[in-house]
Image (tube, helix red, strand yellow):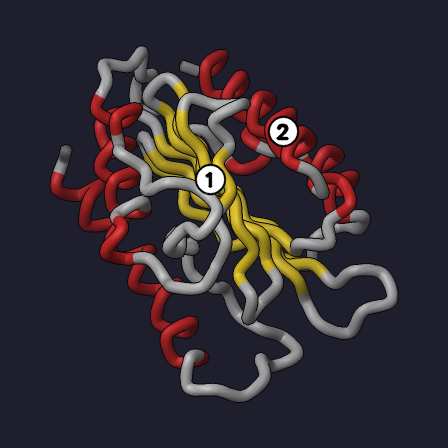
Amino acid sequence: MPLTRLAALLLFAFLVLTPALAACGGGQPAAQAGPTPTAIPPTPTAVAEPTAAAADQPTAASAALTIPCDELVPADELQRMIGVKPDSLMDTVMPGWTACMWFYTPAGASQQSEFTVQAYTGEETLVKWRMDTNPANRLAGVTVNSLADYVQEGYTWVIPESQLRAVQALQDGRYIFLRFPADNLALSTESQIADYLAVLFRRLQENG
């Protein structure tokens, strides 16, 4: 892959990982918590170890897209998903990689929540997928559920400390990662998550 893309990807990962690693020392998060890292799938207790077979198969990968956050997730759709207008957005948009992290304050709440969508296309996709699904990087004690009934390869789990649900999905050479509060009513079941993944994958395909 082009060196500049890999360097940018690693820099973004470093920036979001640093505050999360600091938070591991204990204590409660601040009321206006900053971004947390892209979750690494923990050791599954409900499904078998992924074989990465799907990632090793030839895929119909799209070209490296440049798709802004408001095209990946339109504003009206986002508001329906989270129930309010977001307070702010942290985004990284470049060929082959879009990372969108919206911060918002739910109705009646005092602390911010986050809604994250990341999309990977082009030659970086399988590198990122293998890095995120590497069993050596997993945390213990969290149940991971397979989404193989809905996508080529996929996983979902809840991060206990933050009560955020994480979702990984690989389809036709494209990788989507989601993270949002586990009590989000719009994405409360695997079938709802799968339906939304289908929407996002379709947008990537149409733009590719």
- Of the 4 image quadrants, the one containing the N terminus is top left
- Of the 4 image quadrants, the one containing the C terminus is top left
Q: Is residue 78 visible?
A: yes
> In the visual, does 68 lie left or right of 198?
left
Q: Residue at x 34, y 27 (%)?
A: 121
Q: Mark 1 or mark 2, which has the lower sequence index?
A: 1
Q: Position of residue 147 (x, y in %)?
A: 51, 32
Q: Residue at x 37, y 40 (%)?
A: 48
Q: Residue at x 50, y 64 (%)?
A: 35
Residue 114 sits in quarter? bottom right
Residue 16 sits in quarter? bottom left
Q: Amino acid at mark 1?
A: Tyr
Q: Amino acid at mark 2?
A: Tyr
> In the visual, does 29 lie left or right of 62?
right
Label 1, label 2: how many angstroms apart (C-alpha)?
14 Å
Q: Position of residue 140 (x, y in %)?
A: 38, 64
Residue bearing the label numbered 2: 196
Residue bearing the label numbered 1: 155
Camera-nearest residue between 123 and 194: 194
How packed is label 2: few (under 14 Cα within 10 Å), some, or many (20 or more)?
A: some
Please state the total of marks drawn on the protein image.
Answer: 2
How packed is label 1: few (under 14 Cα within 10 Å), some, or many (20 or more)?
A: many
Q: Is residue 151 above or below residue 105?
A: above
Camera-nearest residue between 163 and 120: 163
